[in-house]
Amino acid sequence: MVSDRPDVPSPRLRWPVIALAAVAAATTAGGAAIADGEGEASAAPAAEVAAAVEKPRGGRDDSRETAAFRRARAAAPPPILRTWESPDVEADAALRKLGRRAEASELRDSTRVRDVLRRGLLLNQLDRDTHDRHVATWEEALEATDDLPGRRAKELGGVVDGVQRLADRGLLSASRMEPAFLMLRENTRLWRTAKLPDNGDRRTVADGTVVLQYYDGRGWQLQPLATWGKINALAARCLAASQSRDDDERTCPQQRKRLRERLDTMLDLAVPRGGRYPAWEYFFSYSGGSPPWVSGMSQATAAQALARAGSALDADRYRDEAREVLGTFEYRPPLGVAVSGPNDGSHYALYSVQPDLRVLNAELQAVLALRDVTTLTGDTTARELYLRGDRAVRATLGRYDTGSWSRYSADGREATAGYHRLQRRLLGELCERTDRGGYCAPHERFLRYERAAPDIDLKVPQRTRTGREVTVRFTLSKTAKVAVRVTDNRDEVVTSRVRRLPRGTHEVTWTASRGGPHTVRVEARGPTGPAEVERGKVRVADPKSEAKKKKKDKKKKEKTKKKKGKGGD
């Protein structure tokens, strides 16, 4: 595997030593005599040696020689030899090789992207075509950043800066250049030609294989999870076809070809993270963490897709790659995603830069994928990792259940409808494949939550007066779209509010301007399922109306009293 660093540091050599070693190596390679029979060495004049070395051979254009090469040759001391019998081409090749290494050593501390690319070429980490392609991508991106207007220049500039920051930190390795420059090249193209995107928009590139997602202020970024999700779905279809009674060559021919192409494209974009395992990295900062980082969920999906493809295509190389990806779950963050869990288990972090965050759908997918890799490859390491993840996630499932809905993260906010369904589906697959009650019971509860209306606990004051602020309190059992409506005794609307509210207690205030009974109606509809309605009554007293009524009643009583008095006379 290629090292995670751009290069392997080599000791700095002084120019005289380099030049002398080059000449000595060339002389020895050609079988030249170092000393005469009597042990006395004779030295050729320095001018003759220099002339012999500097003489162009075969019409070669010396303008291609690097400055470092020329300095190495000029600094050479008079060699100790009596005759020069090695072929010119071998001497030239040896000296040129040492010159390349000397130039690479000079560029060792440079963080300019052009110098990092040049150094990769000099150390044979890049071939000439790859080097030239990356240089052209870099130059074109810089030019476009200067030419584009406003937001387009800012977004592309952010991606350019991201590549430069990798170089600044010594992380722009030869293997990491491929995904980084693919992303940079596509950003240059899209910001020059495509319409302005909305946050979260996605596009596919590299012949429909690689998914890019737009993140506001960070440009188009590689999205490994979405990419591997598509490949995994394709691998699942091909695997199902290969396991059916029908001939899978008839039912899945084009899909098999497309699956191979997409797998090979993604394997070319893998980075040997820390030299330990192939990773598909994210290249933008997230939650305070610096790139490049990995996702446990995307790596698990990659391993699952590779294992499925290995079986569907009967290709051991994909099974072997699936086994290599398992390293993700063996190392602790930030190198990997393994975090110690209960019952001697392991949590598998969604983000290597946020190891303390527990996300249910990510952990379930990791456990499910590791089980599939175990089944399809028979790998013992995969089995151990699966069992460790299984123990940890089953011990903590209660932290994702509110009693009416699921949570996205442990003890955190409620899941959206989409994530709730995903979590319920993953629990169902684990229930079916493992027959463990720890997955089956939560799956049944989550399904029941989808079909149930929210519970509403409504509390309203029984009495109040006009002109006073009235507070209505209600508690929701889960996130819901809530409509609160207050009407008076004439069925006229006093106030009406509609908003989406999370689980918990909420308040709505209103002021009565008219006396009489008022009706409070609260309707709540959850992310899925039917609506629930609760009603309450509030009696509103009007002091002015009551005073008038008392006065009127008083007069009536006095009038009645007078009539009784006259009747008595």
Image (spheres, rainbow, N blue to C red):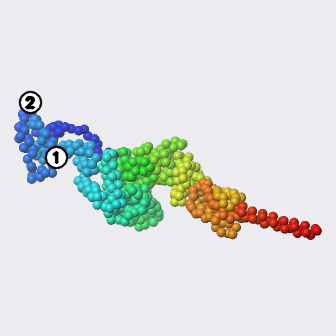
Residue that appears at 52% across and 46% down: 392
1 and 2 marks in contact (CB < 8 Å): no
What is the three-letter code of the residue carrying label 1? Answer: Ala
**Residue for badge 2:** 39
Left or right placement of residue 27 versus residue 459 in this view: left
Residue that appears at 15% across and 51% down: 64
Q: Nearer the viewer, residue 175 or 522?
A: 522
Q: Secondary structure at mark 1?
A: helix
Against 273, residue 142 (above or below) is below
- Res. 490 visible in picture: yes
Disc 1 from disc 2: Cα separation:
37 Å
Residue that appears at 59% across and 55% down: 503
Badge 1 or badge 2: first in the primary sequence: 2
The numbered disc on residue 67 is 1
Residue that appears at 58% across and 52% down: 401
Q: Secondary structure at mark 2?
A: loop
Q: Quadrant of residue 494?
A: bottom right
